[in-house]
Amino acid sequence: MSAQGNAQRAAANRRRYEELRAAGQELKQLPAPTAMDGAPITKDAIVQTEQVPPGWHATVRLSRGEALRICDDLGRSSASLLAWRNEDPCERINCADTVKVQWSAALSKGRMILSDMGRVLLSMIEDTSGAHDLLVGGSTADSTLKAYGEVTRNTQANFISAAAKIGLGVRDIPPCVTFFAPVTTDATGRFVWHGERKRACDFVDLRAEMNLIVAVSNCAHPLDPARPAATTPITLIRHRLPPPAADDVCRTASPEALRAYAFTDQLFA
């Protein structure tokens, strides 16, 4: 193809990209954040409750249709999360596709978290915070050494331990999502931490759209300047839910969401 032909093809691809981006950003209006007292869980719906101390992690198995509430008890923790499909752990969380398909790195109520096979792992059905991180990732031995002058408990080590317990290895650990991690970028593209957005008792409710193994690490986020000494417990509550309604806000947010949920439902048809 000639240089002129290549340029025309590139221009056509660029126009198509812009059209798709514009369509993808015409989202149904996302709901407002959940009020602190806006989503009580009845006692008979609770399957399991666990408090995760600072620096430690927990593994939870969720059945399709159940939900996991993660609560930042004192407003000083961040909860990093990985998820694998229970029946086939080769399918796992994919933060890059979660951003790409929704044309946004801002997770909040009404969003979905995708797998590397284009299906939906988790739906964000409740969220009091709206301050979560899909881009930076969890702490490592190197990041804690650089920040604190010593290697402390860290998310990478916790995920290696969690994966080993279910027969997986280092290569099975993809980038994670971290809740209660108020990270944005400034005008130069540098990540900025907004500690003032953290509140005690902030929580998210994540509905499992397939049977899942979920690992949650309670370690200092790499950008949080107040850690690790100030980290406090998080609480995990596995609970039952009624089936999603036809107008479920996550399932109807966009054409991309409709396709991803339909693709996921085929597994259970």
Image: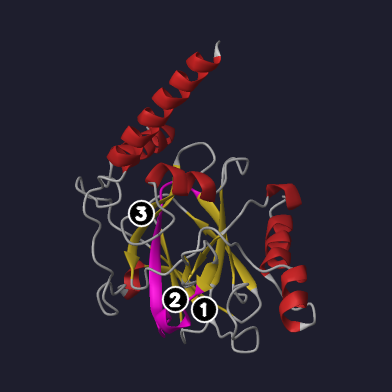
In the image, is 84 to the left or to the right of 126? right
Please report the residue visible at 53 percent of the width from the left and 74 percent of the height from the top: 78
Please report the residue visible at 46 percent of the width from the left and 72 percent of the height from the top: 182
Disc number lying in front (3 or 2): 3
- Up/down of 176 relative to 139, above or below: above
Q: Which quarter shows the N terminus?
A: top right
Residue type for callout 1:
Ile
- Residue identified by numbered label 1: 234
Q: How is the image coloured?
A: secondary structure
State the image coordinates of residue 15 (x, y, percent, origin top left).
Answer: 36, 29
Cβ atoms at labels 2 and 1 below 8 Å apart: yes
| Closest to the observer, 59 or 15 | 15
- Residue reaching furthest to the right: 150
Magenta-drawn segment: 193-211
Q: Where residue 71 is drawn, which disc sits there? A: 2
Residue 59 inside the magenta-drawn segment: no
Residue type for callout 2:
Cys
- Residue reaching furthest to the front: 4
State the image coordinates of residue 22 (x, y, percent, origin top left).
Answer: 30, 40
Q: Quadrant of residue 100?
A: top left
- Residue identified by numbered label 3: 111
Please report the residue visible at 69 percent of the width from the left and 56 percent of the height from the top: 163
